[in-house]
Amino acid sequence: MRKSLALLAVVALFAACAAEPTPTSSSTSDSPTLAPPTSTLSDQENSNEVRWQVDRNGEWSYIGNPPDCEPFETLFTTFPIEIEHLTQFARPGRTGMGETIYIGHGALRADTSIHDQVTVRFPAEGFSLAQVSRRFENYIDSNEEQIKLEFIRPCGSLVRLDHLARLSNRWALIVEGVPLGTDSRITFFPQNVHFVAAGEILSEGIGHAANTYLDFGVYDFRNKNDVASYVVSHWPDYRGTADYGICWSAFFGAETEKALSELPAGANPLSDYCSR
């Protein structure tokens, strides 16, 4: 049953057609937006024309002329939550739920913190909103809405932040038209419209009062990772995410990397991304 639910979530996320999705009403609201990152005029024009898309086989491709990507260690400047909150770091690139699912993102637990007093900031510069999910979760007795925001950079990288609670006013207004459901289906937004700044506050809470955690994933569409063939053969339902996921724990400097490495990893201490 769990594997079936996981398949439904993945299909809902990545069964997009090749054309740019039709924007929802929330995508065209009059909410404030940030200007694209400062660059030369030609680079900015090229970046604004780039669109990344995924086919039914989980293969990512682009329309336009993607600019070069800076090193991730340069691009990522702000850890999403204060390190002091963390009690556990589940590494990205692992199996879960008794090896019934594959998880390409990391999970940051803050078990000793009050869930609606954990500020989440965006970690990098140059990304714009691409996909959103809003839902209530049936597995837990909680009326706390959970929001997943996914942002794409024109050069070909994606940041996923899930289990956001109590969005900032700006982002609540941007996503207010997204349907509120009970599963992980997503709503597409036009890329290069709603930009987010490094360090910008996205929400003032994570997870639920009885389950305080944040999912954080980084994906590189330019190249599949070293375990892509394993994903295709053993976890084909997760093509499009697990075969592009990367280990991000070294992106934020030596001090943060050390702090993360010293945290317990949870039920599965292994990582196909971070151990290579």
Image (cartoon, helix red, strand yellow):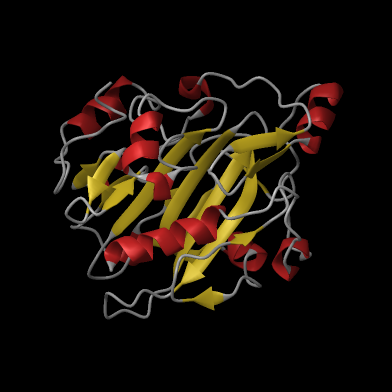
In this rendering, position of residue 132 left or right of residue 163: right
In this rendering, position of residue 71 left or right of residue 154: left
In this rendering, position of residue 115 left or right of residue 32: left
Q: Nearer the viewer, residue 243 or 67?
A: 243
- Which quadrant holds residue 31? bottom right
* Residue visible at 56% across and 62% down in the picture: 186
* Residue visible at 31% across and 38% down in the picture: 93
Q: On screen, 159 above or below 17?
A: above
Q: Nearer the viewer, residue 208 or 92?
A: 92
The picture places residue 239, in percent across and down from the top left corner, at: 45, 43
The picture places residue 207, in percent across and down from the top left corner, at: 34, 64
Residue 204 visible within the image: no
Spot the residue most to the front.
233
- Image quarter where the C terminus lies is top left
* Residue visible at 62% across and 70% down in the picture: 178
The picture places residue 58, in percent across and down from the top left corner, at: 53, 43
Q: Nearer the viewer, residue 165 or 162?
A: 162
Q: On screen, 236 above or below 10?
A: above
- Image quarter where the N terminus lies is bottom left
Residue 231 visible within the image: yes
Q: On screen, 191 above or below 255?
A: below
* Residue visible at 28% across and 24% down in the picture: 255
- Which quadrant holds residue 177? bottom right
Q: Nearer the viewer, residue 94 or 84?
A: 94
The picture places residue 49, in percent across and down from the top left corner, at: 81, 36
